Amino acid sequence: MAQLKLSKKSGAAGIVCSVATIIAIVINAGHVRTNERGLELIGNAESCRRDPYVCPAGVLTDGMGNTHGVKPGTIKSVQQIAMEWEKNILDAESCVNRYANGKMLSDDTFSAAVSVTFRAGCGNMRKSTMFSFFREGPAAYKSACNQFSRWVYGGGRVLPGLVTRAGKEEALCLDGLK
């Protein structure tokens, strides 16, 4: 595949952009529910690249974890990245609302669920044990938060970055239960 000849994210600097700038644009737009802690968790884990790269799971990616409509050789503007990231966050939020009782979750717990959904995809999460626990209601929320450590695989193997991210997601989720 020609796409897989692109440099791996970890091996090349690429054309970087500011995660903080993208977060500020999305927060100022006022369309997402995910709180600033959640956006920072997602944004810092994804980083920001204006040019396409192949992520550790082998998927062509650009912006801040965007995998939709990525074309080799295309350099995106900060505004394009912010718009795509906002759309991807809104898609994850919609999934959490629909399949994980999202409207009933605290902002921190909701934001943690959005983060894992952003990276794992709605198709995987809607059938997950984690989302089942969220659907059961408040008595099962702690059990749901304890599921993040199961979501550490990319490309069929455990990725250290996902282990770190899952720990931060779990802490954010549990903070929402206090």
Image (cartoon, rainbow, N blue to C red):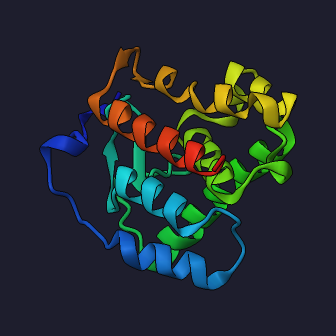
Q: In the rendered view, does 62 fall on the left or right side of 25?
A: left
Q: Residue at point 65% right, 82% down? A: 29
Relative horizontal placement of residue 22, taking residue 100 as reference (left or right):
left
Q: Is residue 66 above or below residue 169?
A: below
Q: Residue furthest front?
A: 178
Q: Position of residue 171 (x, y in %)?
A: 48, 43
Q: Residue furthest top?
A: 156
Total number of numbered labels?
0
Residue in the picture at 40% in, 20% down: 155
Q: Is residue 160 visible?
A: yes
The structure residue drawn at horizontal position 13% and vertical position 42%, both measured from the top left corner, is 11
Task: Report x, y in % for residue 26.
Answer: 57, 75
Can you give x and y, in whole percent of width and height, for residue 66 in the image? 50, 52
Vertical comparison of 82 with 45: above or below: below
Image x and y of residue 154, in percent: 41, 25
Q: Nearer the viewer, residue 131 or 51?
A: 131
Quarter holding the N terminus?
A: top left
In this rendering, the answer to whether 63 lies above or below 142 is below
